[in-house]
Image (cartoon, rainbow, N blue to C red):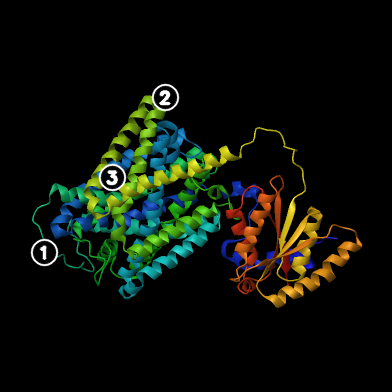
């Protein structure tokens, strides 16, 4: 009687114990009915979805100041007006996304809005821009956090890339634990960042107010170099504005993930977005004002003695005491953790694309912790490659960063204009105007960034986004082809019900092969065991065992004798002679299925896997790749246990 060996049940009993490390790292599996428990409110939504937007206050103004470096101290006169323009655009985008949340309570991401209102190509353009934004946000956020750490501890500069990859690994593991655990971990550093930085800004403004705008810094910032040019050109200001716009990235995250909020869903989403934008506006405005009154400028990140703008500013306001280190620590942690916004958004976008057949279907499956595991791992892998390519330097990544984000803004707001036009009604006109202004504002910003940053890396975005659109269309074409090839409007075909010819590869007489042959004899009376002759002594031993252990018991119960076929292999190859035999057998029997039964040893310990040649897996692969529909491969496992 054919029975699985006792090791199989033993292996299943041991399976939970073998996952102890995975359970420790990302937690035990969550049942599907617990998904409602993973919903978030305002207080957890702000750290989960707002870290990207809030943390950009740390590198957005600095990115603009880097562009103004040729003006040296004169550039500080322009940072205020530049930030004011950015805040105006931020306000427009804020009101625009409030409309989007109301119109799409299940999640109005740029992809969904653009696809439903502007068509397939617009939706894919938005999705590609958004994916690029998410990936770059991870790399920029982590590299900015490590950059802030290096400014506080300059001796760590040689380890920039290693630190970036360590932080990426930790964030990935945290996100694999699920939304609830992620919010719990990120809440404390996020609110510490908000409180300490707002306190430093408030103190700095107070000191400036009581000193008629000329406060005395406790620690004098590094002296600014002599200006390389004496006047700001429009081109330079546009480049500074384009870099500073990175401070707005991330504000779309809430509208992309409305479905993640607990009831009342719309109210919680709007409150979270309002909190993010209000805090970000205060941080940006405060930093822009204080860098002027304390004469703090940007420094070259690749040179020794580098300090971030916020490091210089907090030291000038409070000195290098406990408060300085607490504030800088919170900035470092939040900058690094700001990548979490992408880890919250990218898997959801990938799920939507996979559901629409534009992305591999594995991205639509929830993992053991009710997160879209494939999306998390894919995002981490691509961001890791980017960090390695750019050696973890923030400035090198920023030109690629903002274009994708603002392109997604523009597509979303343009889609909302069409949405309100179709909806009509008393309040639709007001909403249409708000989203229309948002689309114009962000569209102009995209054009400015493309022109200003084209030679610094924006050209890569111009190539990447259309390439991603083509890739998504190719994936959709494949799934459409599969659906067309596999659909069957016919009833079950019961013709040609002949028994299959069963072929089983056999190298020697063993328990796994006996197990496989036993199963093969239950499938058909026409069974062929195939031995590829590589070692003559082994072949002789097999033929002797075949007569004694196969033919004799088969004759005793009056079954059809299985045939033993020996194939010659002058070059000691196994797979090719076996495949050629199976293909020839199929050609000679045009009305029958050829079932190849492959006995396979299944190792119970990971290290045992390294000690075997896995010929069965290789054989299955070549049969499936080079065979056709009348060749069926059946696995018969034998579990190896202690």
Taking 412 as reference, is 523 left or right?
right
Mark 1 or 3: the one toward you: 1
Could you tell me residue 545's position as x and y percent? 80, 72
76 over 103 or under it: above or below:
below
**Which residue does the image show at 62% across and 58% down from the upper left?**
580
Residue at image position (44%, 60%) is 189
**Which label number is shown at residue 422?**
2
The 10 Å Cα crowd at callout 2, few under 14, some 14 to 19, many 20 or more, is few
- Of circles 2 and 3, the one toward us is 2
Q: Quadrant of the C terminus?
A: bottom right
Judging depth in this view, the residue of 264 and 305 nearest the camera is 305
**What residue is shown at x 64% (from left), y 48% (from top)?**
32
Q: Earlier in the sequence, mark 2 or mark 1?
A: 1
Q: Secondary structure at mark 2?
A: helix
Question: Residue 437 sits in which quadrant?
Answer: top left
Which quadrant, please, contains the N terminus? bottom right
Where 597 falls versus 452 (above or below)? below
The x, y position of residue 350, in whole percent, is: 49, 47
In the rendered structure, are the residues bearing label 2 and label 1 in contact, judged by CB atoms less than 8 Å apart? no
Residue 314 at x, y percent in the picture:
29, 63
Other-residue count near label 1 (Cα within 10 Å), few / some / many at <14 / 14–19 / ≥20: few
Circle number at residue 226: 1
In front here: 200 or 258? 258
Q: Which of label 2 and label 1 is nearer to you?
A: 2
Reading the image, the residue beneath label 3 is 87
Q: Give the mark nearest the N terminus, 1 or 3.
A: 3
Q: Nearer the viewer, residue 539 or 42?
A: 539
Mark 2 or mark 3: whose residue is earlier in sequence = 3
Circle count: 3
């Amino acid at each position: 009687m054919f029975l699985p060996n006792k090791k199989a049940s033993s292996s299943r009993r041991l399976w939970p114990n073998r996952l102890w490390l995975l359970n420790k790292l990302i937690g035990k599996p969550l049942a599907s009915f617990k998904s409602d428990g993973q919903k978030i409110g305002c207080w957890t939504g702000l750290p989960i979805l707002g870290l990207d937007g809030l943390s950009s206050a740390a590198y957005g103004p600095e990115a603009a100041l880097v562009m103004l470096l040729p003006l040296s101290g004169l550039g500080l006169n322009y940072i205020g007006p530049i930030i004011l323009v950015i805040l105006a655009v931020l306000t427009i985008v804020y009101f625009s996304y409030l409309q989007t949340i109301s119109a799409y309570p299940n999640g109005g991401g740029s992809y969904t809005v653009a696809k439903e209102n502007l068509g397939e190509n617009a939706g894919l353009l938005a999705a590609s821009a958004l994916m690029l934004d998410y990936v770059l946000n991870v790399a920029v956020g982590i590299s900015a956090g490590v950059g802030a750490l290096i400014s506080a501890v300059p001796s760590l500069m040689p380890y920039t890339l290693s630190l970036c990859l360590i932080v990426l690994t930790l964030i990935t593991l945290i996100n694999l634990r699920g939304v609830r655990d992620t919010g719990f971990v990120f809440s404390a550093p996020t609110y510490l960042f908000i409180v300490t930085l707002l306190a430093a800004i408030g103190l700095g403004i107070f000191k400036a107010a009581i000193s008629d705008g000329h406060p005395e810094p406790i620690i004098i910032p590094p002296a600014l170099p002599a200006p390389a040019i004496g006047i700001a050109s429009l081109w330079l200001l546009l480049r500074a504005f384009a870099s500073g716009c990175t401070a707005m990235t991330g504000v779309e995250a809430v509208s992309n993930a409305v479905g993640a909020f607990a009831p009342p869903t719309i109210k919680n989403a709007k409150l979270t977005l309002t909190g993010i934008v209000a805090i970000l506006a205060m941080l940006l405005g405060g930093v822009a004002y204080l860098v002027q009154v304390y004469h703090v400028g940007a420094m070259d990140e690749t040179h020794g003695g580098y300090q971030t703008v916020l490091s210089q500013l907090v030291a000038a306001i409070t000195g290098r005491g406990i408060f300085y280190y607490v504030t800088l620590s919170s900035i470092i942690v939040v900058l690094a953790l700001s990548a979490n916004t992408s880890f919250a958004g990218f898997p959801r976008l990938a799920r939507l694309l996979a559901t629409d057949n534009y992305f591999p279907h594995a991205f639509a499956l929830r993992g053991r912790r009710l997160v879209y595991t494939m999306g998390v791992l894919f995002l981490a892998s691509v961001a890791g490659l980017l960090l390695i390519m750019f050696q973890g330097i923030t400035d090198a990544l920023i030109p690629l960063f903002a274009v994708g984000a603002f392109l997604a803004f523009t597509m979303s707001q343009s889609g909302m204009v069409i949405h309100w036009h179709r909806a009509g009604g008393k309040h639709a006109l007001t909403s249409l105007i708000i989203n229309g202004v948002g689309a114009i504002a962000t569209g102009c910003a995209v054009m400015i960034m493309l022109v200003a940053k084209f030679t610094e890396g924006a050209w890569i975005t111009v190539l990447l986004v259309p390439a991603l659109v083509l890739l998504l269309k190719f994936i959709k074409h494949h799934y459409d082809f599969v659906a067309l090839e596999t659909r069957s409007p016919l009833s079950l075909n019961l013709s040609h019900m002949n028994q299959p010819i069963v072929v089983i590869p056999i190298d020697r007489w063993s328990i796994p092969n006996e197990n496989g042959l036993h199963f093969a004899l239950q499938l058909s009376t026409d069974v062929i065991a195939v031995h590829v002759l590589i070692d003559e002594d082994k072949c002789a031993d097999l033929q002797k065992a075949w007569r004694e252990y196969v033919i004799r018991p088969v004759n005793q119960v009056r079954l059809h004798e299985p045939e033993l076929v020996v194939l010659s292999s002058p070059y000691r190859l196994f797979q090719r002679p076996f495949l050629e035999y199976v293909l020839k057998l199929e050609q000679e029997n045009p009305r029958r299925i050829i079932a190849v039964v492959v006995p396979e040893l299944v190792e119970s310990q990971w290290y045992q896997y390294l000690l075997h040649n896995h010929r069965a897996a290789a054989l299955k692969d070549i049969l499936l790749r080079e065979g056709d529909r009348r060749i069926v491969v059946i696995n018969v496992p034998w579990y190896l246990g202690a």
